[in-house]
Amino acid sequence: MATDLPAHTEPSEPTEAAQAAGYGAAVRCARPQPVGVFPLPAGFLLIPGGDETAAVRRSLAAGMLPTAWPPQLAAIELAYQGDLAGAVALLTGDDPVTRYNRFVLSPAGSAAPAGAETEAATAAEDPLSLRTALGDELGILVDVVRFAGGQRSVPPILTGESEEIAALVWSAHAAHATAAGRIGDAARMLGRAIAAAHKAAPGLAAQLMATTAGLRRDVEGPTSEVIADLTAALNTLEPTDLVAVRAELHLTLGSVHHELAGAGQTGEDQAGEDLAGLRTAAEHYLAALRLITIDTAPELFASAQVSLAAAYLAMPMNSASDQLRIGVAMQGLRTALTVYTRKTHPQQWASTQLNLANALVHAPSSHRRDNLVEAVGRYQEVIANKVGLADPPAYARVLTSQGNALARLGAFPQATALLHEARTIFENSGDDESAATVRHLLDEIARHRALISSTAGS
């Protein structure tokens, strides 16, 4: 068995001798294979056969689902449709490729759901025996699957693999390097993966391009070069059936434009650029939402809704028609909260609750009082659950927002008590600017109450 690669080194390049050795002629599994292109675990499966399955193999490697599946690939078809139990039930052969595909779909392989278990799938498969049976080139996939499923701490070393197989191994090493904080190593490994997959599996190569652009953004920030790289990857994937991947790329591109729009200096020209950037960001968020639904990709859908709402709420209010945009933003936040619940996504739930509450306070509406009452309730939910409020200034900011909403409702005693508490926290934390903002709110409340008292006494 291959030795685990030390964390500080890279796997060696395939040698010419190893490339010439082939990949196990006894295994009837032609190339290219669509490994790593579609979501796991189906994306790890091998397509058996030769010429009779060539069209399906090449279609999947490019990121497109076949219009028709050959009868001998019924199990693979079910797996791509998400019916893992049905797929395993059809994988009854004892040849190396069928054994490998069972291994991928079994809990011992890529952590398939419990519903996929059958007697054939749960039978222990020895990784070394399976690796040997698959032969050169394909055998390494066993250890890639084990790494992805958490059964190996590091990816396997390349020993002569080529094209899409090598690309998948390089990408596994890049993921390992990224997790260890070795971003430069990860970028180099991804470059080799892209080069290896470019011709054989363009669907995989494009996704690796997007991953590389994401690493570049982490290092360089939201630059025009990052936008260009992400756009190139998206354009390559546009004709594919990798819908969730395309949606995620739109979401990432939107966030880059959004970040750039919020990083400018003041001034009329900059304000115009910021608005254009927010509009571009919103277009990408909308494009993502057109590709997915709350049923097909709930977390991605919720994230896109929250991002779109943030872009809409950051745009200036110049006309009455802008109220429609605010309404769309608030509805998007409400929809996201059907995915982000307090139990399943506590941090996202708290953040979305606060965003919705803030929008309710500031949005123009004929139901002003109802909106304020709802906002106060949402602030209180976050405060009561203390999610994301371990940092005292963060807690004080929510108290300030709730106090402001209560003051707008005319509940001055309650508002004053919350604002005094918030001011004390800010002062103790050394946040003089926030403390001054709270003092200004308290002064406004005091003046308003004095005006009411003088009016009542006259």
Image (cartoon, rainbow, N blue to C red):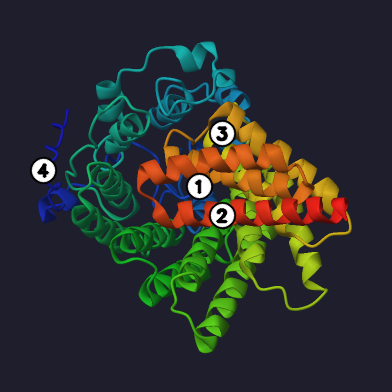
Q: Nearer the viewer, residue 76 or 239?
A: 239
Type of amino acid at the residue the image marks with label 1:
Phe
Type of amino acid at the residue the image marks with label 3:
His
Residue 353 position in % (x across, y down): 64, 42
Location of residue 75 (image quadrant):
top right
Q: Which dot marks residue 345?
A: 3
Type of amino acid at the residue the image marks with label 4:
His
Q: Which dot marks residue 8?
A: 4
| Disc on the earlier residue, 3 or 1 | 1
Residue 373 position in % (x across, y down): 79, 42
The Cα–Cα distance between marks 3 and 2, rounded to whole angstroms, is: 26 Å
Q: Which dot marks residue 397?
A: none
- Give the mark toward the camera: 4 or 2: 4
Does residue 409 appear to the left or right of 223 in the view shown? Answer: right
Q: Which residue is mark 2?
A: 242
The Cα–Cα distance between marks 3 and 1, rounded to whole angstroms, is: 26 Å
Q: Residue at x 49, y 36 (%)?
A: 388
Q: Which residue is mark 1?
A: 38
Q: Secondary structure at mark 4?
A: loop
Q: Secondary structure at mark 2?
A: loop
Q: Secondary structure at mark 3?
A: loop
- Asked if the residues shown at circle 2 and circle 1 are in contact, with their CB atoms under 8 angstroms apart, the answer is yes
Q: Nearer the viewer, residue 183 or 326?
A: 326
Location of residue 319 (image quadrant):
bottom right
- Asked if the residues shown at circle 3 and circle 4 are in contact, with their CB atoms under 8 angstroms apart, the answer is no
- Whether 230 is drawn above or below 330: the answer is below
- Whether 92 is drawn above or below 458: the answer is above
Residue 165 position in % (x across, y down): 32, 48
- Whether 210 is drawn above or below 129: the answer is below
Residue 338 position in % (x across, y down): 71, 38
- Asked if the residues shown at circle 3 and circle 2 are in contact, with their CB atoms under 8 angstroms apart, the answer is no
